[in-house]
Image (cartoon, rainbow, N blue to C red):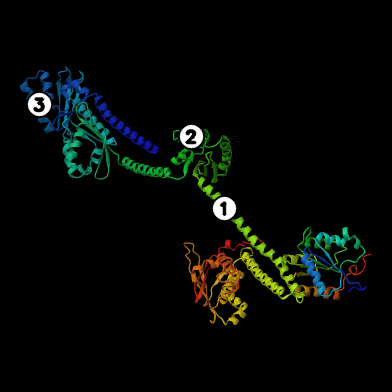
């Protein structure tokens, strides 16, 4: 995560700034004290040395060893007095009196000939925090008056105030613990950062005691850790300070603590409020986790795609490519990786034999066109191994592009085969229709001649012909009559497609009424009853519907039982479709009769052209009628079926679409 | 019957020999005495009318009074021949009756547009054909007055 790394760096440099600032503050303080003209020493309320500047050591004649932090004031005085040649009895008395004066008067001054040989002026004073500040000044020969002590005291006070101001001016909390781990110096910010123990923070308090109090008041978030364990860890860390560490306060603030042990064994602590920093950090972490997760998902998705995918920047440099892409072209992931340019990829592709240089050049020539159009393009790449890759370029707003690659070899071949097959089928269908139409059309001509000359022969030479000849002529003419029927039926059959009309709203009641009026004479002769009512209105070819009903009702009248008055019932019912599944609304048209019926074994045969169940002598017919019916029904998007019971009757059912899509309305005929 | 008593000539253009024979029979049956001439395609028809080639010898004869024209013929079809006749100032006044197997609306419209006098679909039976021929005879020969070039010598 590039972004994250940058942020991390930011955070680290923040730390550096913080650390530098803290170090600087301590150093500044030391400079302030060590650079002072006066010797300066600070003792805690137990009169242990906290700090002494070099000038103090020099004026008083102490060694470094003798002024270790924590050394008691009495101890140091004893060394100095011994060194000055004061007798042991006097030493203790002097020390005791000094302490008494300090406690009673809050401070005092005295002259002293230090072991260093210097005549010095010493001023001791107890502060509000019960610390003891000792200032030492060299007495110049000309300065022997009493006013000097007063001035020295003022200087010491000024130094103390300056130090305190410096500490207060710091943005961070500051605390100084002596070697005994007692709090010596601290600023307001330190108290602010420990609000739960603000009331007990005071000079001389031990670190561990303050920590325990803080814990008992739930000032810190231990993350569920055992309290003792936590305290042990924290104290140890405090006493052996190393890296900065962060602490979560129960009020939600984060405090970063830098602790450092100084040369004299004190512990200096700088506390910074890093709540904002932490907040940003955790936000960044969350963002980065989210990014990492989505990146993972993205990669998983990318590498499991069926298609190859590449992303190029505006300079045609590869940004990302998935495994499938490499696999499709047989590319090595060591070559085709982010940073390679598209022309380089093509060059490489040529070198491993995916396509020829000419192909690549041509594709390159086509690309600027694509880039300029800024629109999605799809092109087919014909690899030398015979595979066909469909490449789709999708331009991106930043000038780059995304390309997807799909192996469409199989698809293309199937489509090609299908197209070829369809073309062949269409051609053969058309030929067949042409043949049926032309044949039946042209057959009529010679047939007309045969009929005519037969007529001529019979009429003109009737008297001269023997009886037998007349019979032959009659048989010939019967045959030609049948042939005329056949030809007419065939012509009708072929016209279902060649002379089809567009579908239009059609009331089937009207169609049936028309058919019945045509069949009037036959109905009367047979004494038949034809019932119909409430038939549907559908979209259909009116001529063909009439043809269909004429055939079916005609059949019902034709195949009647001897001595039974034919009853034919025409009815229709709606079969609701399903819009969602794309099943259209249909009607089921039924024509039921009480005629001779048929054996259901033959029900598939009866719709086949030229197939007949009965001898011509019993029932007339060409065997084309029901085939024509089936073709009409199929053109209207339905199916025809028949059910018969021998000697009882037959029911023909035709399903027909209520409505047709516009495209199916187009006349399929071409003559 | 023409004014000078000479019966008008009837020209039949039909490529079908059977039909030519049947038409001849029908004329005989109808007792029409008019000379009946036959040509077998559009080209012959035009040669006949223009008295060219084999038909030069008819140069002095009057034009046929009526032409019975079939549409579907080899070499030059009836439609083309009809167009040429109607374009020809000498021939355009001769009445042309279409006698064909076609029932196509397109043919009917087109030929009337070119100026035919009647459009008759060939009857299926001989009896009907005889009736048609009788009607033609009664109308075009008995009733109608024809242009002079069809009734008198062209010379």
Nearer-the-camera pick, A601 or A146 = A601
Residue A95 tag number? 3
The structure residue drawn at horizontal position 75% and vertical position 62%, both measured from the top left corner, is: B72
Name the residue at the left extreme. Answer: A89
- Image mark for residue A193: none
Residue at mark 3 to residue at mark 1: CA–CA distance? 123 Å
Residue A30: x and y in percent read 25, 27
Discs 3 and 1 share one subunit: yes
Residue under label 1: A421
Relative side of A209 to A598, left or right:
left
Q: Does residue B110 appear left or right of residue A668 in this picture?
A: right
Secondary structure of the residue carrying tag 1 is helix
Looking at the picture, tell me which residue is in the foreground, A122 or A437. Answer: A437
Q: Farthest right residue?
A: B155
Whether callout 2 and callout 1 share a subunit is answered: yes
Residue A134, placed above or below residue A436: above
Q: Position of residue B32 (x, y in %)?
A: 84, 74
* Element type at mark 2: loop
Q: Which mark is residue A340?
A: 2
Using the image as rendered, state which of residue A561 and residue A433 is in the foreground: A561
Of circles 2 and 1, the one toward us is 1
């Amino acid at each position: 995560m590039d972004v994250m790394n940058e942020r991390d760096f930011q955070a680290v440099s923040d730390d550096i700034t913080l650390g530098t600032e803290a170090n600087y503050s301590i150093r500044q303080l030391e400079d302030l004290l060590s650079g002072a003209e006066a010797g300066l020493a600070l003792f805690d309320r137990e009169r242990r040395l906290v700090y002494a500047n070099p000038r103090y050591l020099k004026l008083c004649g102490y060694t470094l060893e003798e002024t270790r932090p924590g050394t008691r004031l009495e101890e140091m005085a004893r060394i100095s007095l011994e060194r000055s040649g004061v007798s042991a009895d006097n030493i203790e008395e002097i020390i005791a009196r000094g302490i008494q004066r300090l406690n009673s008067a809050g401070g005092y001054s005295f002259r002293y000939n230090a072991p260093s040989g210097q005549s010095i002026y010493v001023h001791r004073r107890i502060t509000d925090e019960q610390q003891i500040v000792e200032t030492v000044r060299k007495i110049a020969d000309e300065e022997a008056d009493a006013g000097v002590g007063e001035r020295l005291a003022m200087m010491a006070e000024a130094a103390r105030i300056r130090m305190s101001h410096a500490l207060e001016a710091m943005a961070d909390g500051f605390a100084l613990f002596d070697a005994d781990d007692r709090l010596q110096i601290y600023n307001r910010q330190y108290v602010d950062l420990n609000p739960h123990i603000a009331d007990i923070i005071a000079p001389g308090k031990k670190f561990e005691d303050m920590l325990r109090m803080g814990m008992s008041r739930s000032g810190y978030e231990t993350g569920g850790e055992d309290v003792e364990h936590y305290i042990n860890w924290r104290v140890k860390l405090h006493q052996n300070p190393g890296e900065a560490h962060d602490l979560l306060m129960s009020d939600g603030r984060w405090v970063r603590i830098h602790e450092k042990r100084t040369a004299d064994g004190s512990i200096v602590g700088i506390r910074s409020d890093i709540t904002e920093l932490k907040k940003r950090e955790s936000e960044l972490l969350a963002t980065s986790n989210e990014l990492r997760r989505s990146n993972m998902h993205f990669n998983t998705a990318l590498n499991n795609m069926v298609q190859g995918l590449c992303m190029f920047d505006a300079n045609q440099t590869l940004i990302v490519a998935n495994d499938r892409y490499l696999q499709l072209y047989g590319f090595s992931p060591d070559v085709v990786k982010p940073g390679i340019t598209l022309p380089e990829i093509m060059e490489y592709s040529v070198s491993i034999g995916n396509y020829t240089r000419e192909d690549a050049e041509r594709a390159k020539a086509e690309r600027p066109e694509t880039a300029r159009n800024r629109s999605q393009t799809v092109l087919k790449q014909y690899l030398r191994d015979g595979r066909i890759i469909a490449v789709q370029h999708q331009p991106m707003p930043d000038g780059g592009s995304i390309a997807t690659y799909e192996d469409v070899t199989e698809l293309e071949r199937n489509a090609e085969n299908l197209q070829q097959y369809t073309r062949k089928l269409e051609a053969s269908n058309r030929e067949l229709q042409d043949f049926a139409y032309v044949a039946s059309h042209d057959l009529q001509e010679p047939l007309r001649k045969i009929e005519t000359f037969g007529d001529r022969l019979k009429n003109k030479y009737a008297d001269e012909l023997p009886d037998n000849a007349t019979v032959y002529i009659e048989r010939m003419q019967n045959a030609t009559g049948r042939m005329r029927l056949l030809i007419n039926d065939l012509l009708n059959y072929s016209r279902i497609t060649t002379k089809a009309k567009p579908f239009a709203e059609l009331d089937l009641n009207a169609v049936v009424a028309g058919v019945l009026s045509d069949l009037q004479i036959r109905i009367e002769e047979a004494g038949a009853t034809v019932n119909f009512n409430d038939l549907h209105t559908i979209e259909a070819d009116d001529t063909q519907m009439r043809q269909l009903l004429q055939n079916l009702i005609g059949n019902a009248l034709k195949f009647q039982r001897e001595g039974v008055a034919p009853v034919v019932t025409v009815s229709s019912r709606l079969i609701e479709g399903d819009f969602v599944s794309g099943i259209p609304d249909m009607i089921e048209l039924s024509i039921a009769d009480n005629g001779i019926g048929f054996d259901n074994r033959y029900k598939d045969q009866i719709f086949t052209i030229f197939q007949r169940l009965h001898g011509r002598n019993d029932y007339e017919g060409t065997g084309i009628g029901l085939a024509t019916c089936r073709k009409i029904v199929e053109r209207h998007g339905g199916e025809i079926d028949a059910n018969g019971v021998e000697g009882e009757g037959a029911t023909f059912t035709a399903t027909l679409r209520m409505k047709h899509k516009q495209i199916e309305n187009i006349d399929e005929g071409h003559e | 019957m023409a004014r000078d008593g000479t019966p008008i000539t009837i020209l039949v253009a039909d490529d079908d020999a059977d039909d030519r024979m049947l038409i001849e029979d029908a004329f005989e049956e109808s007792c029409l005495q008019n000379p009946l001439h036959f040509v077998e395609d559009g080209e012959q028809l035009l040669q006949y009318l223009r008295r060219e080639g084999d038909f030069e010898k008819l140069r002095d004869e009057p034009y046929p009074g009526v032409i019975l024209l079939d549409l579907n013929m080899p070499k030059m079809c009836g439609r083309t021949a009809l167009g040429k006749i109607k374009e020809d100032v000498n021939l355009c006044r001769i009445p042309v009756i279409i006698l064909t197997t076609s029932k196509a609306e397109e043919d009917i419209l087109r030929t009337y547009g070119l100026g035919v006098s009647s459009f008759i679909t060939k009857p299926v039976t001989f009896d009907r054909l005889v009736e048609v021929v009788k009607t033609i005879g009664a109308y075009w020969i008995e009733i109608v007055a024809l242009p002079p070039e069809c009734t008198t010598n062209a010379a």
